[in-house]
Amino acid sequence: MIVNRKDLSWWERLYLPAIASGFKVTLRHFFKKKVTMQYPEEKWSVPPGYRGAPYLVKDQEGRTKCVSCQLCEFVCPPRAISITPPGPAVQTDAENVEKRPREFEINMLRCIFCGLCQEVCPEEAIFLMKDYSLNGESRKEMIFNKDKLLALGGVHNDRIMKWKQKAVEARRQEVFPVQEARP
């Protein structure tokens, strides 16, 4: 198929109208207010609802809140989370908590900051922090292990204190008087 094109006029062949419209756009942007930030000195204000990097948090007593249920690992779309549950011989330091993860890793290079891990966590052990400056000199540095995630996440002040309530309930059941059957 052959397309017949109209020949350009003498004025159009000079390209002066195109150059003039390009200069017009340039001059319009030249006099606008500049929005460039000098990053290390000027920090970006994080808007509400921003989903940053996921971190593990501790409870008020300094223990990790993660109970190694692996829901976050299963729901993670890019498979950035890797959890190794403890074996049967591992004893936990908290009563009424069945298990703690032996290893917990998040590959920050794979993470897409979707927030599904935070939503699915039944213990509120993962939070997305308002952190947007993740950097490292190698790929190995960008794989955060449990200790690094806990150090970055800090302590979460939980008002509910679920495990303390469970421990109180368990103690109450142990001292419950059993009535003997009378004939």
Image: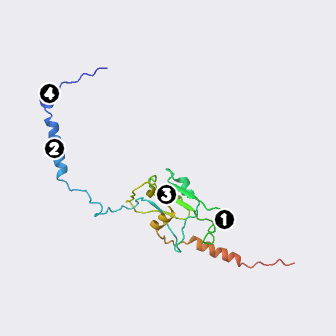
Name the spot of residue 131 as percent of width and height, x first.
Answer: 39, 62
Q: Mark 3 and mark 2: span between their CA atoms?
A: 49 Å
Q: Mark 4 and mark 2: span between their CA atoms?
A: 22 Å
Nearest to the observer: residue 112 or residue 101: 101
Q: Mark 3 and mark 1: span between their CA atoms?
A: 25 Å
Q: Which mark is residue 17?
A: none
Q: Mark 2 and mark 1: span between their CA atoms?
A: 74 Å
Name the spot of residue 29 as percent of width and height, x first.
Answer: 19, 50
Judging by the rendered image, the residue that carries numbered circle 1 is: 89
* Helix, strand or loop under label 2: helix
Q: Nearer the viewer, mark 1 or mark 4?
A: 1
User: Along the polypeptide, which appears first: circle 3 or circle 1?
Assistant: 1
Dot 1, how many residues are within 10 Å of its Cα: few (below 14), some (14-19), or many (20+)? few
Residue visible at 51% across and 53% down in the picture: 76
Name the spot of residue 132 as percent of width and height, x first.
Answer: 38, 59
Judging by the rendered image, the residue that carries numbered circle 4 is: 9
Give the vertical position of 110 relative to 145 (above or below).
Answer: above
Q: Identify residue type, mark 3.
A: Ile
User: Along the polypeptide, which appears first: circle 4 or circle 3?
Assistant: 4
Judging by the rendered image, the residue that carries numbered circle 2 is: 23
